[in-house]
Image: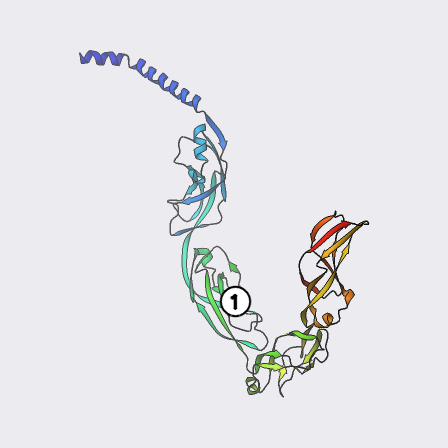
Amino acid sequence: MWKAVLLRVWSNLGSLLLAFAIAFAVWISAVVAADPNEERDFPTPLNLQVHGLDSGLVLIGTLPDQVLLRLSAPTSLWDRLTSRVDTVEVFIDLAGLSSGEHTVAVQVESELRPFRVVQVTPSEVSIQLEPLAVQELEITTQIEGTPALGFELDTLSLDPETATLSGPASLMAQVARVVATLDVGDARETVSANATLQAEDEAGAVLSGLTIEPAQVQLEQAIVQAGGYRDVAVKVETVGLPAGGFRVISISVNPPVVTLFSTETEIVAGLPGYVSTVPLDLSFAEEDIVTRLSLNLPQGVIVVGEQQNVEVIIGIAPIETSILLNVQVEVIGLGSGFETELSPLTVSVILSGPLSTLQSLVGDDIRLFVDVTGLQPGTHLIEPQAEIVPLDVRLLSVIPGSIEVVITRSP
């Protein structure tokens, strides 16, 4: 019986296969009709990755920064493909390649399927591989600039003292030294900084394309004062007092610090840390004083530099105080046919300003008034306004702060 069944199946095998193929084609057509393929450019350029590079080799030159793709995929897959940048990877595979020049195809991979690569730009890249060389060198320090006049270089510290360089053997063969540079121009104290290391050839040209570990080192250059030199502060000496009602509000000197020199180092070393100017007379001063003063220096001591004296600025300002006055309140803006009654008629005011100005105030120098322009008959509370003639006098407060104004029609 089984033999008869098998013979019947065998005799109809072609028909069964044809029926299966037709059914599969119908299914594929239905799927494609429901979710058709779309050919699009990938919306963002992709970074080119490198796979399989031998640890003993190094890649020379630069690869394309980005790769452009054109793919064909079902409509439903496109949203998933473009939802994240890392869904699609473009790379070159260098596994098994030796040193020399090579042309390598750009490959595309993704865990999402199905899709078809229509175009890759660029589709291949030319590369050069060289043996990797590694070398440890002592770091050479290079000091640029010179300290300020009267200062000199002292000890130099470097941490670490060696660096490891790695890169193509042909480029490493050109390395003569690895340099750390520190600028000490016009320095008056120890200079400390993180210096970036650079590889140089015999001619001093900087070599790029090498890896230096560490990339930076800590450099510290001690700066000390040379023998016979010393920095000291400048102290301004004054005599006399400003005019009555005035005071000194500031004293400034430029430069505030000067460098002194003497061939007899013990004289400079014995100074108290400052040097005084010749006395400046402030008697009866009523305004700022700007002048240049020479320094009172010991015998055999000079000022280093072109300027042998200093600029001094003395700030003079009036002594300020405050006073309490009673002032009668005036009315302005009252229309014809109306009259007013004020309560109170006088107020207390506190004024602030230079003592000399406040002491010389006269009756017309300050007015207090209420403005009733446009107001209708009735009772109003109005804040008084002030007019003060001396510009350097300020009104601090008025007591009370509001005046009751009763406006009535004239009989």
Q: What element carries label 1?
A: strand
Is residue 355 something one can see in this rendering?
Answer: yes
Residue 237 in the image: x percent, y percent? 65, 81
Residue 346 in the image: x percent, y percent? 72, 62
Vertical placement of 33 versus 226: above or below? Answer: above
Looking at the rendered structure, the kind of residue marked 1 is Leu
**Residue on which the image places disc 1:** 182
Which residue does the image show at 43% across and 44% down from the upper left? 49
Which residue does the image show at 45% across and 31% down from the upper left? 78
214 or 74, which lies in front?
A: 74
- The image quadrant of residue 368 is bottom right
24 or 391, which lies in front?
A: 391
Vertical placement of 74 versus 232: above or below? Answer: above
254 or 218, which lies in front?
A: 254
Point out the residue furthest to the left here. 1
Q: In this view, does 263 lie to the left or right of 90?
A: right
Residue 27 in the image: x percent, y percent? 38, 20
404 or 90, which lies in front?
A: 404
